[in-house]
Image (cartoon, grey):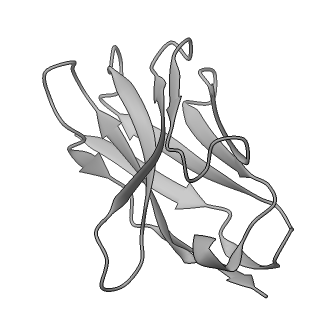
Amino acid sequence: QVQLVESGGGLVQAGGSLRLSCAASGRTASSYAMGWFRRVPGEERELLATISWSGGMTYYADSVKGRFTISRDNGKNTVYLQMNNLKPEDTAVYYCALRPTVISTYIYWGQGTQVTVSS
């Protein structure tokens, strides 16, 4: 089993920054990738960014490219999402997830952390 715990959410003014953390534990060795998603009530979950387990490959959705940066600390088994120049439309619950293998989907999820951006 894998456990993921997010932290770092909160209330910030537009233009501000937050850094989310996702601490992974359990059977995470040799996993394929981790990702950050968000969900606004009434809307579909949105994939924001992914990073390979080695950290060498990243992907960003157009909506966050240039503003958000995903990174990982293998020693701490933690993935981060640095969010800069936040906008009110970034308000959502943010989730991290783990994809165990290349042929699997993201099947392990954290509990989510609320990010609220005020205008």
* Picture mark count: 0
Q: Quadrant of residue 114?
A: bottom right
Q: Nearer the viewer, residue 105 or 67?
A: 67
Residue 40 at x, y = what percent? 42, 78
In the picture provided, is 103 more to the left or to the right than 58?
left
State the residue at coordinates (28%, 32%). Answer: 99
Q: Quadrant of residue 76?
A: top right
Q: Is residue 55 at least partly visible in the picture?
A: yes
State the residue at coordinates (25%, 41%). Answer: 106
State the residue at coordinates (26%, 46%). Answer: 108
State the residue at coordinates (62%, 50%). Answer: 21
Residue 78 at x, y = what percent? 58, 36
Against 73, residue 38 (above or below) is below
- Location of the C terminus by quadrant is bottom right
Residue 62 at x, y = what percent? 54, 45
In the picture provided, is 118 more to the left or to the right than 74?
right
- Location of the N terminus by quadrant is top left
Q: Is residue 115 at least partly visible in the picture?
A: no
In the picture provided, is 39 more to the left or to the right than 81?
left
Residue 14 at x, y = what percent? 82, 76
Against 87, residue 47 (above or below) is above
Q: Residue furthest front?
A: 62
